[in-house]
Amino acid sequence: MSQQAERFRDPRNALSTLRTRLVMAGVFVGAIIALSLSVAFSWNVGPEGGAGGGAPKLSPAAAEAFQSPPGTCLTWNNPDATDARRVPCAESHLFEVTSIVDIGAQYPPGVPSPNLEQWQEISRSQCTVDVKPYLGRNLDPYGKLSMNLLRPTPAQWADGDRQLRCGLQWAGQGGKLQPTKGPAKEQDQSAVWEPGTCLALLNNSFGDPIDCAQAHSYEIFATLDLKTKFKDGYPSQEQQNTWLDTECSTAAQEYSGNADLAAKKLIISWDVREQESWDAGSTLVNCKVAAVLPDNKGLAPVTGSVKVGTGESPPPSSSSPPKTGG
């Protein structure tokens, strides 16, 4: 390793594998919570519904979205998904239905709806069974896509509806659903962001995309494909680190216009891939720049982009960063 590269080496790389496992586990649970609590489709409140009226009805678009067959993609704009609708999978979307599961045998009429922990277990046990046949390959356990489900609304449950829509989504590290394009079986599952993306600072780690003008954790400056170097099979993480050390350092100089990142107290970091990810076809990685706290126990805030032509980012503060979300 060159002396210059050593200056930029992320001191937390030794913990990257463990950190990745923990973060992805947290994202999976957080995504289940977000979707199972927030997806409550539009109510069409007419003369027979609303305050003092009878049972409200689902709007036609929401009812159609909930009854979607496998292979259907859905999207919405409102935080509570009250404007959920079907869209072609080639367009930007937030959820792709992969299978339909009926839990009527376990939850017959009159039985209360599952609680949140039970919904999570149902998603893990029922939705993961059919995902490999649907994708035609393994689901990358560390990739951008994760399983979730659309459950019946309270009114549907009371009427005896026990059908669930299992599906795939991309939940960012901060828990916000990220749009994807194209059918899931055609997507690269690598958890990468476009160069120029900055990620929010979240509890001394990283969250969802944020404007680079705001205090952030990482700035993504390159996406590399490990297969361009390693054509004969999965490379060890030591081999990945050795190659990415050189490639990311070169890409950083091109992106920043040969800026002295060390003088700005910034370090270069990168992703490494697990064997399971490689086997699922995830070979893309991000190169990124960040700052670390003086005790090396977390990321420090950086404001502004290091990209050439956008202005220089000031040195990060040496104090503990504020907790900001994505």
Image (cartoon, rainbow, N blue to C red):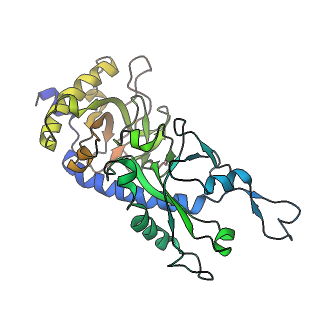
Q: Position of residue 69 (x, y in %)?
A: 55, 53
Q: Locate residue 261: give its quadrant.
A: top left
Q: Position of residue 49 (x, y in %)?
A: 83, 65
Looking at the image, which residue is at 16% across and 43% down? Answer: 237
**Vertical placement of 123 versus 93: above or below?**
below
Residue 286 or residue 134, whichever sits in front? 134
Residue 90 or residue 223, whichever sits in front? 90
Q: Locate residue 219: give its quadrant.
A: top left
Q: Which residue is at the far bottom? A: 110
For this view, does 298 lie left or right of residue 101?
left
Residue 194 or residue 141, whichever sits in front? 141
Q: Position of residue 157 (x, y in %)?
A: 63, 72
Q: How many marks?
A: 0
Q: Which residue is at the far right? A: 47
For this view, does 279 lie left or right of residue 105?
left
Looking at the image, which residue is at 86% across and 66% down? Answer: 48
Q: In what quadrant of the picture does the N terminus appear?
A: top left
**Vertical placement of 112 versus 188: above or below?**
below
Looking at the image, which residue is at 20% across and 48% down? Answer: 275
For this view, does 322 lie left or right of residue 143?
right
Residue 51 or residue 312, whichever sits in front? 51
Looking at the image, which residue is at 64% across and 49% down? Answer: 84
Q: Position of residue 64 (x, y in %)?
A: 66, 53
